[in-house]
C-alpha cells in the first residue's frame, strides 16, 4: 500500500476507488477460524427507516467531502473490533429485539467491503425472522464486480440504497477524491442491479444548491434517464448536514459552505409527478 488517503484535500492525489477498496479491506477484514471477520465500532438501534438495528462498520473506498461518519473512515486501523458474521447477526438481533424493530442494516462505512463477510451475514439474515436488510452503498464494488451483485440477487431480504455523489466526472473527483474516470462505476452498479433483478433505489447528493450546480444536477438526471427513466421517479435527493465531522471535512477540502441551508432544489421526482399530472398521463 502506498500512502493511504485520509481527509480529502484540494491537492490530494486522485485514487482508484477499487484499489482503495482493496487497501481498506486489508485493514478492516481478516480471516479467522474459517470465518471472514469485519471491523465494527458499535451495534445499536436508530429511528431512521421507521426503526432499524444498525451495525456501525469501519472503512470506506471514497473520501466524500460531505461525509458525516466518524474518523474511523479516515483511520480505519485505529477504530473498531473484528466480528464474525455470526457475532454481527447476534448483535443486530439483540438490538432489534430490544427496540422491537424488524429491519437491519450496516452503516458508518461502505458495507460491501469484505464480500464474503457480507454474503455470510446475508445468509443468516435470510434464514431469520427479520423482514428487511437495508444495504446502503456507494456502488463502487457493485460496479466493478457483477458476480457480487448476482450473489446478492439470490437473497430476498436486502434492499439496496445506492448513493451517487456527483453528476459529472470532474465534480466526482473534486467531492470524493477518486479519479474522474471512476465516476462511471456507480452507474455501472445501477445497470448491474437492474440486470440482476435486485430490489434497489437511487439516492443522490443533489438537492443542496450550495454544492451542486443546476448543470451538474441535470447531467446526473440525464445519466439516470439514459439507464431507465423510472429511476428518477424514486430518486431520493439529499442535502449536506452540519455534523462536526462533515464541517471538518468540508474545511479540509477547501469548500466554503454557508449555514444554514436556505435553498434546496425542488426534487426531480416531484417535478416529474407534476408534469405527469399536468399532462394527465397515467402514473
Ligand atoms: S459518504 Fe459514504 S461513500 Fe462517501 S466517504 Fe462517507 S461512507 Fe464513504
Image: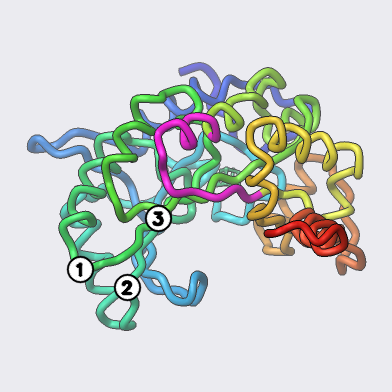
Q: Which residue is at a point 34% across and 31% down the rendered structure image?
A: 150
Which residue: 53% across, 27% down? 4
Mark 1: which secondary structure? Answer: loop
Relative placement, left or right, of 37 versus 23 is left
Magenta-colored span: 190-203
Mark 2, Cα crowd under 10 Å, few <14 / some 14-19 / many 20+, is: some
Mark 3 = which residue? 106
Please tell me in which quadrant of the rendered image residue 128 appears.
bottom left
Q: Is mark 3 within 8 Å of ligand 1?
A: no
Q: Which of the 4 image quadrants contains residue 171?
A: top right
CB under 8 Å between discs 1 and 2: yes
Residue 64: quarter of image: top right
User: Residue 271: x, y in percent?
Assistant: 83, 58
Please tell me whether mark 3 sits on a helix, a strand or a loop.
strand
Q: Earlier in the sequence, mark 1 or mark 2?
A: 2
Q: Nearer the viewer, residue 4 or 62?
A: 62
Label ID, residue 129: 1
- Secondary structure under the numbered disc 2 in the rendered image: loop
Can residue 135 be found in the magenta stretch?
A: no
- Distance of label 1 from label 2 (alpha carbons): 8 Å
Q: How is the image coloured?
A: rainbow
Asked if residue 280 is positioned above or below residue 251 in the image, the reply reads: below
Amino acid at each position: 500500500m502506498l500512502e493511504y488517503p485520509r481527509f480529502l484535500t484540494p491537492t490530494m492525489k486522485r485514487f482508484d476507488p477499487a484499489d482503495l477498496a482493496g487497501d481498506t479491506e486489508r485493514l478492516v477484514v481478516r480471516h479467522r477460524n474459517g470465518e471472514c471477520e469485519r471491523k465494527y465500532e458499535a451495534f445499536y438501534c436508530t429511528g431512521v427507516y421507521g426503526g432499524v438495528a444498525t451495525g456501525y462498520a469501519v472503512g470506506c473506498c471514497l473520501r466524500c467531502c460531505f461525509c458525516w461518519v466518524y474518523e474511523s473512515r479516515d483511520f480505519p486501523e485505529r477504530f473498531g473490533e473484528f466480528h464474525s458474521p455470526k457475532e454481527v447477526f447476534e448483535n443486530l438481533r439483540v438490538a432489534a429485539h430490544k427496540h422491537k424493530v424488524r429491519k437491519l442494516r450496516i452503516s458508518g462505512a461502505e458495507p460491501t467491503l469484505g464480500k464474503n463477510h457480507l454474503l455470510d451475514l446475508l445468509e443468516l439474515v435470510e434464514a431469520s425472522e427479520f423482514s428487511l436488510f437495508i444495504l446502503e452503498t456507494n456502488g463502487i464494488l457493485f460496479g466493478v464486480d457483477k458476480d457480487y451483485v448476482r450473489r446478492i440477487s439470490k437473497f430476498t431480504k436486502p434492499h439496496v440504497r445506492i448513493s451517487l455523489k456527483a453528476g459529472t466526472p470532474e465534480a466526482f473527483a473534486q467531492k470524493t477524491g477518486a479519479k474522474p474516470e471512476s465516476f462511471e462505476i456507480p452507474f455501472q452498479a445501477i445497470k448491474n442491479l437492474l440486470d440482476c433483478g435486485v430490489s434497489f433505489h437511487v439516492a443522490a447528493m443533489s438537492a443542496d444548491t450550495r454544492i451542486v450546480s443546476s448543470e451538474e444536477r441535470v447531467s446526473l438526471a440525464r445519466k439516470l434517464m439514459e439507464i431507465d427513466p423510472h429511476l428518477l421517479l424514486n430518486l431520493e435527493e439529499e442535502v449536506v448536514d452540519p455534523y462536526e465531522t462533515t464541517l471538518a471535512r468540508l474545511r479540509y477540502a477547501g469548500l466554503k459552505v454557508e449555514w444554514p441551508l436556505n435553498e434546496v432544489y425542488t426534487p426531480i421526482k416531484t417535478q416529474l409527478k407534476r408534469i405527469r399530472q399536468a399532462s394527465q398521463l397515467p402514473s
